[in-house]
Amino acid sequence: MSPSTSPAKVSDEQRAREEELVELVVASFDGAPDERTRHLLQALVRHLHAYVREVRLTEAEWGAAIAFLTRVGHTTTESRQEFVLLSDVLGLSMQTVAVNNEAYRNATEATVFGPFFVDEAPQVEQGGDIAAGAPGEPAWVEGTVRDVDGNPLPGARIEVWEADEEGLYDVQHDDGRTYGRGRLVADDDGGYRFWGLFPTPYPIPDDGPVGDLLASTGRSPLRASHLHFMVSAPGCRTLVTHIFVRGDELLERDSVFGVKESLVHDWEHHPAGSPTPDGRDLGGRGWASTRFDVVLAPA
Ligand SMILES: [Fe+2]
């Protein structure tokens, strides 16, 4: 007989036994000196027990879950965080981003940070090229940084990073190269502009237990094409976000649930030989362009 999913099928006596255990475990944390720790653990216990009771978890399933988490732990190294990946594919990372970046008027929406940010990216002048030799279609990106009242934020720090056309970040190559990333400072009008690459989709690392989970449930490891931004200015909430590409077929099934409609942008493709906004000679190549106006919430 398959386990029931309906708590209604549990007898009164059984329900009482299960609830008694929940309360016993919750009460075991009553003496925790730190109030926040107590709250976190007691709520965790209630939700975990509710899950086990709702799905009527079998002992074999409990064992499989422990074995899976053990593999996640063994796969995690200095340079590979399989627990974060698990959080990502369960939407837990994105939900945490949502909770910590409450909607505020017209402020730009946040999304996942991801594992490929580097602290000291090269400083790039206005109109400079963050691609720095990374292969891909050149893309002109421009916009402004403003507060929610529309005041420009001169001096705002804009950090951008993205994968090359193979879907790899510089740090995924083992030769120490730096490309596809840079930091800019907004000009006196809050404006910014730079050359980057038209974004390319890429898979999250899928050769470990999280990849197995995706494969066994018919889910793709691919992320929708995106360009990462982190924008900060004094007195404002730092924004970590991406912009996506309208028309990308992966928008509906981004493996980490990072897509927000407000972050999906129109990108124009300009044929080979078209004049560029800053007169840059692209050697006859085509190029793309988009605009991203950033609005920062108050801190
Ligand atoms: Fe990314």
Image (spheres, rainbow, N blue to C red):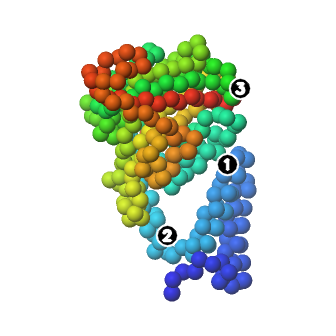
Alpha carbon separation for disc pair 3 and 2: 52 Å
Name the residue beneath numbered marker 2: 62
Give the image location of residue 133, x and y in percent: 29, 25
Check the image and report above or below for 111 versus 144.
below
Viewer-nearest of discs 1 and 2: 2
Residue toward you, 295 or 24: 295
Residue 149 — which label? 3
Residue toward you, 183 or 136: 136
Disc 2 residue type (three-letter): Trp
Check whether the beta carbons of the residues at disc 1 and disc 2 lie within 8 A of each other: no
Task: Name the residue rendered at 36%, 20% in the picture.
Answer: 275
Disc 3 residue type (three-letter): Asp
Residue 245 — which label? none
Task: Name the residue rendered at 29%, 31% in the picture.
Answer: 135
Task: Name the residue rendered at 51%, 83% in the picture.
Answer: 2
Task: Give the class, few, some or many, for how many residues have Cα within 10 Å of label 1's Cα (few <14, many ≥20).
Answer: few
Check the image and report above or below for 88 versus 290.
below
Report whether residue 122 is seen. Answer: no
- The mark tally for this picture is 3
Viewer-nearest of discs 3 and 1: 3
Q: Secondary structure at mark 2?
A: helix
Task: Give the class, few, some or many, for how many residues have Cα within 10 Å of label 3's Cα (few <14, many ≥20).
Answer: few
Q: Secondary structure at mark 1?
A: helix
Viewer-nearest of discs 3 and 2: 3
Task: Name the residue rendered at 27%, 34% in the picture.
Answer: 174
- On whether ligand 1 comes within 8 Å of the CB at mark 3, the answer is no
Disc 1 residue type (three-letter): Thr
Mark closest to the chain's N terminus, 1 or 2 = 1
Locate residue 20: give its quadrant. bottom right
